Image (cartoon, rainbow, N blue to C red):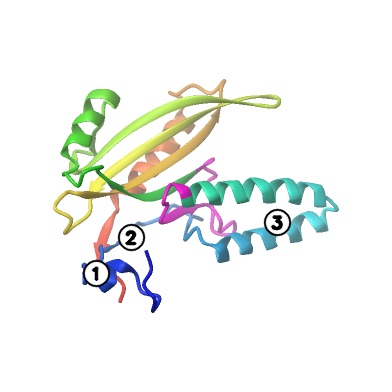
Amino acid sequence: MVGSDGGSLRDMLGVRKDPEFYLKLLDGWERHIPDDARRDAIDAELKRRFIAANRPDLHAMLRAQMDQAFALMKQQSVIAYFSATNEMASKAYIPGTMFATVRRTPNGETLDGYVTQAISEYGAMPLYGDKRFIRFERESTKAFEGGSIVMTSIVYVTPIPGSNRRRGLQLTASIARPVEMSAEDPKFVGWKTAFDLCVSTLRWAPPAA
């Protein structure tokens, strides 16, 4: 909610802002805010590439998919997303993206119940033995024209400092692999390890003024 002067209700009530978080990102990966400015910048680059290739039809199709993706991120209250958008710096391709959201409990209780559920239902475990984080995976198969892919979601949750464990930062990495690629394939295991290492570098800092 926004006040008449443009400030948020949270600011008007004097509620302390959550601290900012930082990650050491994978090579070629960058952090983005899912706002209209970013969407327009991506669209402009897509349009430039496809017009140069004389394929405006592909631009129209991808524009529709992009609009859907940004609408979904807004619906899910994504506060940041991470992807391999720096092609010059990227050394290894990982077919995935990571999203950051704030996890809240329905009635304002602590996250302990959610953590217990994640452990019992999804086999959640601490990340590299660090009990500040829980980590679990979920997997599904998605069909599309011409074949199928396996989507793996790796979910990481850690309490936000100062929230008394009532809010948590959730980072969700989504990775796609061909159905014929085994979950034990060294390349796929390497992709997951890369995300684990990235999340393990999480650091908190005072909120921006």
Residue 69 lies, in percent from the top left, at 56, 47
* Location of the N terminus (image quadrant): bottom left
The answer to whether residue 155 is magenta is no
Position of residue 124 relative to residue 91, above or below, is: above
Identity of the residue drawn at 23% across and 70% down = 13
Identify the residue at image location x=21%, y=67%. Answer: 15
Quadrant in the rendering for residue 19: bottom left
Identify the secondary structure beneath mark 2: strand
Q: Mark 3 points at which residue?
A: 46
Neighbor class of circle 1 (other Cα within 10 Å; few <14, some 14-19, many 20+) is few
Please report whichever mark, 2 or 1, sits nearer to the chain's N-terminal start: 2
For marks 3 and 2, give the one nearer the viewer.
3
- Judged by depth in the image, the label closer to the viewer, 2 or 1, is 1
From the image, tell me which residue sits under label 2.
Answer: 22
Q: Position of residue 73 (x, y in %)?
A: 48, 49
Q: Which of 137 and 190 is in front in this view?
A: 137
**What secondary structure prevails in the magenta region?**
loop
Vertical arrangement, residue 131 with respect to residue 181, above or below: below
Residue 129 position within the rendered picture, expressed as x and y whole percent measured from the top left: 19, 38
Q: Which residue, as the protein is rendered here, is positioned at the far front?
A: 4
Q: Which residue has dot 1 on it?
A: 206
Q: Label 1's element?
A: loop
User: Which segment did they paint magenta?
Assistant: 75-96
Between the C-alphas of marks 1 and 3, the distance is 36 Å
- Crowd around label 2: few <14 · some 14–19 · many ≥20 (10 Å): few
Labelled pair 1, 3 in contact (Cβ < 8 Å): no
Mark 3 nearby-residue class (10 Å; few <14, some 14–19, many ≥20): some
Q: Name the N-terminal-most of marks 3 and 2.
A: 2
